[in-house]
Amino acid sequence: MEAALPSKKTQESRDSAASSTDTAARPVGHADRTGSGQPDNKWSRAAKSPGVTPMMAQFFEIKAAYSDCLLFYRMGDFYELFFEDAEQAAAALDITLTKRGKHDGKDVAMAGVPVHAAESYLARLIRKAFRVAVCEQVEDPAEAKKRGAKSVVRREVVRLVTPGTLTEDTLLDARVHNYLAALGRAEGHLALAVVDISTGEFLIAPTLPGRLSAELARFTPSELLLPDNLGDDTAVQDALADWRDILSPLGAARFDSGHGRWRLEELFNVATLDGFASFGRAELSAAGALVDYLEDTQKGKLPRLAPPKRLPPDGAMMIDAATRRSLELTRTQGGDTAGSLLATIDRSVTGAGARLMAKRLSAPLTDPVRINERLDMVQYMLERTSLRQDMRMLLKATPDMERALARLSLGRGGPRDLMAIRLGLDAAHSAREALAASGDGLGALPDDLAAVHDRLGRHHDLAGTLKRALVEEPPLSVRDGGFIAADYDATLDEFRTLRDQSRRLILELEADYQRLTAIASLKIKHNNVLGYHVDVTARHADKLMAPPLNETFIHRQTLANAVRFSTADLSKLAGKISEAGDRALALEQDIFTALTGQVMDTAATISEAALALAELDVGAGNATLAAECGYVRPDVDDSLAFTVRNGRHPVVESALAGTSDSFVANDCQLEENGRLWLLTGPNMAGKSTFLRQNALMAVMAQMGGYVPAAHAHIGVVDRLFSRVGASDDLAHGRSTFMVEMVETAAILNQAGPRSLVILDEIGRGTATYDGLSIAWAAVEHLHNINQSRALFATHYHELTALKETLDALALRSMKVREWKGEVIFLHEVAKGAADRSYGIQVAKLAGLPPRVIARARQVLDHLESQDTGAGAHGPVHDLPLFQDIPARSPEKEDKNPLEQALEDINPDDLSPRDALTVLYKLQDILRGRDSSG
Ligand SMILES: Nc1ncnc2c1ncn2[C@@H]1O[C@H](COP(=O)(O)OP(=O)(O)OP(=O)(O)O)[C@@H](O)[C@H]1O
């Protein structure tokens, strides 16, 4: 079921607005293929300049249409790059930059990559945000020659490789979705359309400027298409600030919503889209542009796309990019996957399962009914250990059907993709049987599992056909044949027999010739130049060249050790062999096409089965996690409760697993008279860990998973906000403090009563008074205006005074114990405020020089002695940092005994004998002996 090829109408309605610039290839940017008419740029002009060779003219013409891409220009076994493309590719790939000919009196730079290794080079270029146009030879050189000796082989760009349009396994991460997104705007509304062409998933989500960044963060697309006239919309521009590296602006005409509707109707072959959903104009605009772009990059071949699914605007917990980063949901702040929440809790065993798990974690649900349905599945699996284990064993051996389908739909598939479908369908069948057998009849399966059971489908016929058709270990490519099993197709078997028989006949002929010539060492051999030929050593050659044998043996070639002949019988036989071989190969290729057709005819249900397997994988994986780590099923409803008993941080807990430390569990109860917890305590005591673990608890519960606690009751959170730790965002020109304030502003402007907010050390990044004032005002705002459930960690003990005026504020602190001047962190959250901050003890633990620690103690003592004791009633008085510190002589106080002793010496008063005594004394001090006695 291949989607329609572009029609003339499509081409003509392309973006005439797209500008054509003289830019060289560059990381993702503006495409200037206008579709109608020729581009006018330096390349098109170069094509017409005098003295260009026909091949260069061809290159320039193609390059003119793809000036925003690196052009991989096929020449024999290499893709060559020229001019600045060559320079950029050589730098990006670390390959040799050479020269080939001249243009305009200057050397033409050239670099090349071998075709057989092109994928790995492509992968590196894509990672560096280049786009690549792959230009192939589309005719036989012999054909070109017929047009004249000087004519050039025809070449065409067969594909544009961009970050969002990859399908090759080698270019993709099996466990991560690769989304391409488009942003549409119409009548003041915004919408995102999102596809993963490597799986066929197609989603449409209405959005708003305030939600756009969070919505994008949920998908983290590799590429985002948007109309090039969005520059006037500052709200959208602000929302896109985090995403500027992946933007691909396109001519606004491509985003026409009427065109979009028509595109989708044509693609899905329906008279109206109402059967899918009633899409708004912004949604159609985004979806239409997306489909157009796919067709452009795939050069007319559209991948199989599932009908677009409209995501309800409030279906998922909103988590903006900053919150995702700070909570390290799918990546750590350093950008690694290891150490993220996902890496810690993902127990899926298939690529599709891992992708689904990541998707769920990125978009926790807000509907308690749906959440509980997912939880029911986990519970069912948790309670049935052998079902769970069998299922995981089965899934482990299941290939990625979704990605195989995508490649087959684009004509990039091979026999192994068919095999993947076969094995996947077998697995779906076995999983279905295992599920049916697991309960007391299907009635006992929870709803989600019953639905999975049905969606696994019945594909007996197709699976049976593929099983009969394919050899057990098929080759990667269709090109050389050898993948269709014997007994599948009678004609193919006949050709193969003929081919094999002829091979036997050759052996017989060889024996005949050995007898005829009485040369026992005579052989019939094969090579690419002569084909089948008779081969004798030079010593025997004369005999074959003399009568009567020269009538049979025709001399072809003399080498140092061998002389080669052909014969009429041998040529006839060789013809038969090659004909049978060619016909067998052609037939195998036809069978491949037919099988692919059958697969594509049922692509929609195969894809359903693949998704159902992925859901099983996630369900069984989450149950395994719960069993391994002692997680519990959370109570999720639409109350405003947030009660966690003995909660743990999944990542910190697993990091501590191999050490002598164990994780200390803590309760958290955000309720009417303690909705906002103000948490104080020393550095390193575990404040951030506690804050995050509660945010993660909400994410895990709402994605439909078990949670690391003894008990959890969570009223759904609609938006999650986190501001933890300060970091610079120099790439976007923001200082630490600015980042902190931008993120805090987002929270205070957007959070509501159903939100969960965690704020860690707001105001830390600026002068103390300013910071304290901001933190103070932020707590008041959170409490009075936002009224969210919130955890607020701070070093400003002065804030605890707010308890007196804010009813729903509760004070908590991290317990520590002091022992012999050292601080011991208990990691326990206790009622009340912390008494002191122990910052100096922590600094000591961190290894600050003793001198600095001693000096800090002095300063602290001084500051504390200045404390007016106004305490809760006068925050400003608690901060005497900017009051004058009386001048002291730190040098004197800081001197060590050796320095002091040296300073005490007056050399003029010393006799030689005294001097000797002093020297001994100094040496003693140096060696640490007490010299007073
Ligand atoms: N509940 C806990 N049980 C065991 N270890 C913990 C616990 N909480 C935190 N830790 C350990 O203490 C370390 C410091 O924790 P965390 O960063 O949360 O402290 P903090 O109070 O936020 O410090 P700072 O104010 O310096 O940011 C963690 O890396 C972890 O190893």
Image (cartoon, rainbow, N blue to C red):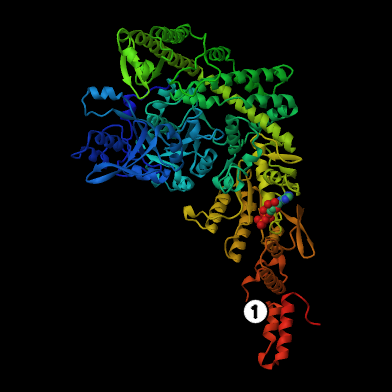
Name the side, left or right, on which 393 lies relative to 352. right
* Image location of residue 625, percent across then percent down: 70, 35
Name the side, left or right, on which 466 lies relative to 478. right
Q: Is residue 235 above or below residue 886?
A: above
Name the side, left or right, on which 738 lies relative to 858. left
Name the residue at 69% across, 77% down. Answer: 896
Q: Quadrant of the N terminus?
A: top left
Residue closest to the eye, 193 or 926: 926
* Image location of residue 55, percent across then percent down: 26, 34
Q: Is residue 612 above or below residue 653?
A: above
Q: Is residue 474 above or below residue 34?
A: above
The quadrant holding residue 94 is top left
Residue 466 in view of the camera: yes
Q: Quadrant of the C terminus?
A: bottom right
Question: In the orientation shown, which residue stands out farthest toward the left?
Answer: 50
Q: Secondary structure at mark 1?
A: helix
The quadrant holding residue 187 is top left
Q: Is residue 532 above or below residue 214?
A: above
The quadrant holding residue 707 is top right
Disc 1: which residue: 891
* Image location of residue 469, percent across then percent down: 52, 13
Q: Tag 1: residue type?
A: Glu
Name the side, left or right, on which 83 lies relative to 695. left
